Image: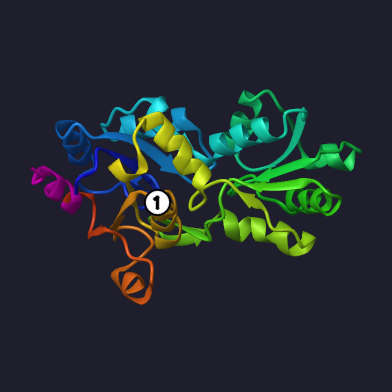
Amino acid sequence: MNFKAMVIDMDGVLWHGDTPLPGLQTFFETLEANALAFVLATNNAMKIAEDYTAKLASFGVSVAPKNILTSSEAAASYIRHHFPGENSIYVMGESGLHRAIKAQGFEVLSAADIKAGAVATVVVGGLMREALNYDLLAMGSLLVQRGASFIATNYDSSFPSELGFLPGAGAVLSVVEKSSGVSPTVIGKPNTLMFEEALRRLATSPRDTAMLGDRLNTDIEGGKKAGMQTILVLSGVSTKEDVERSSLKPDYMFDDITALSQALKQRP
């Protein structure tokens, strides 16, 4: 393992829900001891970087917001650069996506706004739990049918929790895709935008950087597309059996971050 920096997924790698995985503090201590720069990159769009800084602090780990990249912030940045003339965006998501969109200077339109006659030419969505309702998805579908651009923060079908695997953004947003007949432009992993931004922050080349994650079809696939080394941990979604059945193979595979920490300590 001859990389100089890491892009690290969070859900399924560092924690399940609000429960930190064993060895979390030791893992970050090992990164520091090995002078490994890192960016934490997540497809979760319900939060922004500052939220994760607070969450990690509650686990006894200090990480600056500049070292955290969420798909909500990446999506908001994408919209700002690709739709510079827009002022109002229709948002299907939790507070993290709303805050990220507003931070880019956009007004957020709701289902009630659309019913009242407001028009949006960009629709962006992410995982919704508390905010999820029929009207929110229905108005988004109508806008897309009328020609609005459809952006998804990510399209993960599920995510790991303490209870098991729960429906992800892809499962929720498929309602809009199926009803409108339009597939979204997906910002998060395995697409390259997230990786390009992470590499820019790290100031490293892809070949000198490793992607660490728990999903073959997002973390590992995306890391390989970006030209990075890849590390799969088996503490989240993908299993050893999944790897054996797949043509997509990580460069390295460990049971969890505890085993990875031990391997990093043995690097020359």
Label 1 Cα crowd, 10 Å radius (few <14 / some 14-19 / many 20+): many
Give the residue drawn at x 38%, y 34%. Answer: 55
Q: Position of residue 223 (x, y in %)?
A: 40, 51
Horizontal side of residue 168 vs 259, given as left or right: right
Q: Position of residue 190 (x, y in %)?
A: 48, 53
80 is within the stretch colored magenta: no
267 is within the stretch colored magenta: yes
Residue carrying label 1: 223
Q: Is residue 239 visible?
A: yes
Which color scheme is applied?
rainbow
Residue type at mark 1: give it.
Gly
Horizontal side of residue 215 vs 105, given as left or right: left
Q: Is residue 10 above or below residue 105?
A: below
- 166 and 249: which is toward the camera: 249
Q: Quadrant of residue 7?
A: top left
Give the residue drawn at x 88%, y 43%. Answer: 115
Q: Position of residue 48 (x, y in %)?
A: 50, 33
Q: Position of residue 86 (x, y in %)?
A: 77, 30
Residue numbers of the magenta segment: 259-268
